[in-house]
Image: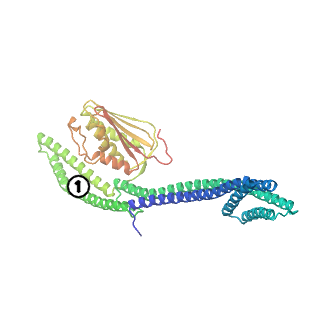
Amino acid sequence: MMKLSIYIKLIMGFAAIIAIMILSSTYVLFELNAVANGAKNILSSNVRTQKLARQLYPAVQNETEYAEKYLISNDEAYFSLFVENKKKVGKNINLLFETMTSDEDLLLIKGMQKAHASIVVSMQQKEKEEEEDKQSTRNEKQKQIRRENKRLMLDSLDLLIRKSHFSIGKEMARIESTITRSAKITLLLIAGTLFAAVTAALIIARTITRPIGQLIRGTEQIAQGNFKKILVSSHDEIALLASAVNDMSRKIDETNKLKAQMMQQISHELKTPLQAMQSAHDVLLVSGSVQESRLRMLAAIKRSIDKITDFSMQYLDLAKIETGAMQYKITVSDIHKIVAPVVDEAKLVAASKNIHIELEDVAVPRVLVDMEKVSIIISNLISNAIKYTRKNGNIKVSIGLSDRGVQVAIKDSGIGINPEELSCVFDRFYQASNIEKIESNGSGVGLAIVKAYTEGQGGKVLVESIPDQGSTFKVEFPIEDNPSVRA
């Protein structure tokens, strides 16, 4: 299959549109030119015919009048005028003959030529008779013939003038009809050209935007962790771009897998020494000979062991999430029974900073969640709130309804988050820039796990914050199809 670049597609499309416009315009111009030429030829011919006929009309009348006057008076001046007028009539009749195109008009002109010739012949015979001094009864007959020929010529001229008038009117009607038809054809051509141009533009746009849309959807899937190969219905630059994105996606996938494997390996490697340290701690703790100062050291060791163990488990969970190995045990659960114990445990931790934690809930439907994962989500959010709330602060945990189902909101009076950093707080290992305002520090994976766990169960996590006034984290969970509201 021939590969066409976007540039070639655009050029071909524009060339097709231009060609259609040129062809339609050429056709219209050709039709109008044909009408103009036809009108010019016919009108000029008819106008010339009328002009010659109008010139002949008085000439024919003068010719016969001069002839009659000469015959009555025998004045040579009238004869000279007759001869001069005869030449003019003969010349104009010949010119009329040259302008005629139809056989009917040619016959009419020939009749005029014969009538004129008859008048000339009668005058020539009269001249001979006068030279021979002969009088004849034929004079009256010749006179009658001349009158009839005169009438024939004048009637012929009237007929020619009427016919030329009729031809001009007919031609004007034909021109009007042709112009009307050409206007209709022009409108059809314009509409057809517009339709063809729009169709060509849509086809070109479709061939370009469709693979771009496929590429956009593919990159969105990559952003969500789905590294499936992107297939585009194109063989141009977009296909090359899709190939480059697929290569990048494959390398990112390979890198993530290696990173996940490394995190899993690190987590597993940490377990063995942590278990040994935990066992040693337990043995020393139950030994009766341990002094009071050593007990405090053992307590510190215990906290460190627990902290490292917690970090190890979080890293392991992140590795499972990235590789798609995380399993969820979705059940119909009462969200209050999940949240309340976590809040009670958190109150013990918050008491050391004199932070007040309040739980507020309303009747809500049961949710479809993994209870253990939801417990970790709420625990991480409350721990995060305690960490970033100063002493004597307040934390409010509320349960209510939302557009997606049931919502749990954790609102604190802590240091808040800068607006430009809100979109990054759920990135793994991210630390806010104002963290120096508090004494403690975190690993940067707690909120990443919150987001992954929530979305993994079909939920959604949101955050709102004002610097130095506090933050509100909201997690929404789906409800069962036929919800039973807890009283």
Whether residue 464 appears in this view of the structure is: yes
Q: Residues within 10 Å of mark 1 (few under 14, many from 20)?
A: many
Q: Which residue is mark 1?
A: 267
Given residues 390 and 339, the one toward you in this image is 390
Residue at the image position 42 percent from the left and 44 percent from the top: 334
Query: Please, which residue is most extreme toward the right here?
Result: 137
Describe residue 382's horizontal placement relative to residue 107 as left or right.
left
Describe residue 26's horizontal placement relative to residue 121 as left or right.
left
Query: Please, which residue is most extreme toward the bottom here?
Result: 1
- Position in image of residue 423 (x %, y %): 32, 43
Residue at the image position 43 percent from the left and 61 percent from the top: 12
Query: Please, which residue is most extreme toward the top here?
Result: 392
- Position in image of residue 140 (x %, y %): 86, 59
- Position in image of residue 452 (x %, y %): 34, 50
Whether residue 228 appears in this view of the structure is: no
Corner quadrant of residue 135: bottom right
Given residues 6 and 296, the one toward you in this image is 6
